[in-house]
Image (cartoon, helix red, strand yellow):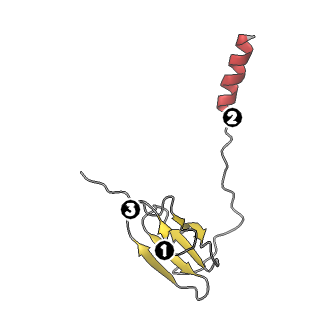
Amino acid sequence: MRYVWMCLFLFGLTINLSAQWQSAGEPVKVAGSAAEEFTNPVWSPTDGQLIALTKPDYRGIWLLDLTDGSIRQISDETGAGFGFSWSHNGAAIVTRVAKYEG
C-alpha cells in the first residue's frame, strides 16, 4: 500500500497545473509607435480611464490615458514594472525597484 501512495505522490509531482497564456488574436496598437511593446496592463480602480503598463523587461512604468490615447512614462527604474499595483483610490501606483551594484 505504501508503494501505491508513493507512486501516486510522484505522479502528482509531474502534473503541471499552472495557467498558460492563450492569445485571443493579433496584438492591437492602442498608442505609441508600432515599434513599442508594452505588457502587464493594470486598469486604474476608480474610473478605468488610465492603464498602467510596463515593457517586457519590466523597466519603467507608463500611463495610457484612454480618453485621448496619450501615453507618458512615470518611471524609468529597473524592475518597477514587476508586481506594481494601484492604490485603492487610484491616486498612486505602488512598486519596488531593483538596484544592482557591483
Q: Which mark is residue 62?
A: 1
User: What residue appears at the point 53 percent right and 70 percent down from the top-left corner?
Assistant: 53
Give coordinates of residue 68: x percent, y percent: 58, 89
Q: Which mark is residue 78?
A: 3
Residue assigned mark 2: 15
Residues marked 3 and 1 touching at CB (< 8 Å): no
Give coordinates of residue 47: x percent, y percent: 64, 79
- Vertical comparison of 38 with 18: above or below: below
Q: In what element is the residue under mark 1?
A: strand
Displayed quadrant of residue 4: top right
User: What residue appears at the point 72 percent right and 22 percent down from the top-left corner?
Assistant: 8
Residues marked 1 and 2 touching at CB (< 8 Å): no
User: Three-letter amino acid code at disc 3?
Assistant: Thr
Give coordinates of residue 16: x percent, y percent: 67, 39
- Residue 59 shows up from this direction: yes
Q: Earlier in the sequence, mark 1 or mark 2?
A: 2
> Would residue 16 be found to the left or right of residue 75 on screen?
right
Marks 3 and 1, how far apart at CA: 13 Å
Q: Which mark is residue 101?
A: none
> Would residue 84 be found to the left or right of residue 18 on screen?
left
Q: In what element is the residue under mark 2?
A: loop
Give coordinates of residue 89: x percent, y percent: 57, 73
- Vertical comparison of 9 with 55: above or below: above
User: Three-letter amino acid code at disc 1?
Assistant: Trp
User: Three-letter amino acid code at disc 2?
Assistant: Ile
Q: In what element is the residue under mark 3?
A: loop
